[in-house]
Amino acid sequence: MRFRSFFLAAAAALLIGAAPSVADSPVVVELYTSEGCNSCPPADQYLFELRERDNVIALAFHVDYWDYLGWKDRFATEDYTNRQRAYARAMSSPMIYTPQMVVNGAEHVVGSDRRRVDDAIQQASSRPPAIDIGLTWTENRALTVSIPAAEFEGDATIWFVRYSLAEESNVTSGENAGKHLVHANVVEELAALSMWKGEAIDITLPREAIVDDSGEHGFGCAIIVQPEGLGPILGAREITYETEATSTW
């Protein structure tokens, strides 16, 4: 997998006068997709549109269960498939499928059904988040994640997600053979930072994180707080940083 760091984003912002953009209390839309599924490209394209909305964090999780059809999706991992299966259990859904969009951890819809996706986003955005996550840059260009105390019973997970803003593939076999596929916000890392039980907590993410600066189109990072076992998202924040193909890091 390729890794990017928003700590480099802070350094680059200082060098070229740009700044990362931060989304406030948005709705998280997770697309479960595969390059081996010929129904997925319309949903992949739709995710490019969704990520332009100020109130949406759009994430593409590529799953691996269609790899047997003849094309191995290089962005897919078993971890992302397991996350989709966990959603199915949490929502008492009898199956997993692609393209699937999970909206704020609470509702799943066919990812290419724009009307239903829009309705789900509108409903989710009408409900305020349970917690307001704070993100603060430190003087040494580390990032502090601040979770306030809140009334919450049970255990939750603070997730860190890193993603590439754009990726592409020339598919030579399988259901999408001969197609040039483009993808938005492709998740490259999903990691549990800490458990949360309702207490105030600060987590500092150091700039010494392992990174890969080989990409061309920029990257983003999201912090998501969600009940253990998945379920309705309690709060989320996002930082994105765009680069041009000719930029150097």
Image (cartoon, grey):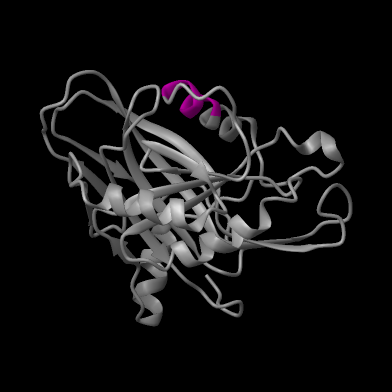
Q: Is residue 185 magenta?
A: no
Give x and y (percent) for residue 56.
Answer: 36, 57
Q: Nearer the viewer, residue 105 or 6?
A: 105
Residue at the (53%, 32%) spot, across then down: 84
Q: Quadrant of residue 167?
A: bottom right
Left or right: 175 with respect to 95? right
Give x and y (percent) for residue 130.
Answer: 18, 39
Name above or below for residue 9 compared with residue 212.
Answer: below
**Please, which residue is most extreme toward the front here?**
115
Q: Quadrant of residue 191?
A: top left
Callout count: 0
Q: Is residue 87 magenta?
A: yes
Q: Quadrant of the N terminus?
A: top right
Name above or below for residue 243 compared with residue 230.
Answer: below
Q: Nearer the viewer, residue 89 or 213?
A: 89
The secondary structure making up most of the magenta span is: helix
Residue at the (66%, 41%) spot, across then down: 76
Residue at the (86%, 55%) spot, across then down: 177
Q: Is residue 95 visible?
A: yes
**Please, which residue is most extreme toward the top here?**
154
Q: Quadrant of residue 61?
A: top right
Give x and y (percent) for residue 139.
Answer: 23, 60
The span shown in magenta is 85-90
Name above or below for residue 225 compared with residue 170.
Answer: above
Give x and y (percent) for residue 104.
Answer: 36, 42
Q: Is residue 209 visible?
A: no
Q: Nearer the viewer, residue 116 or 156?
A: 116
Residue at the (20%, 23%) spot, across then down: 197
Left or right: 219 with respect to 168? left
Left or right: 153 with respect to 11? left
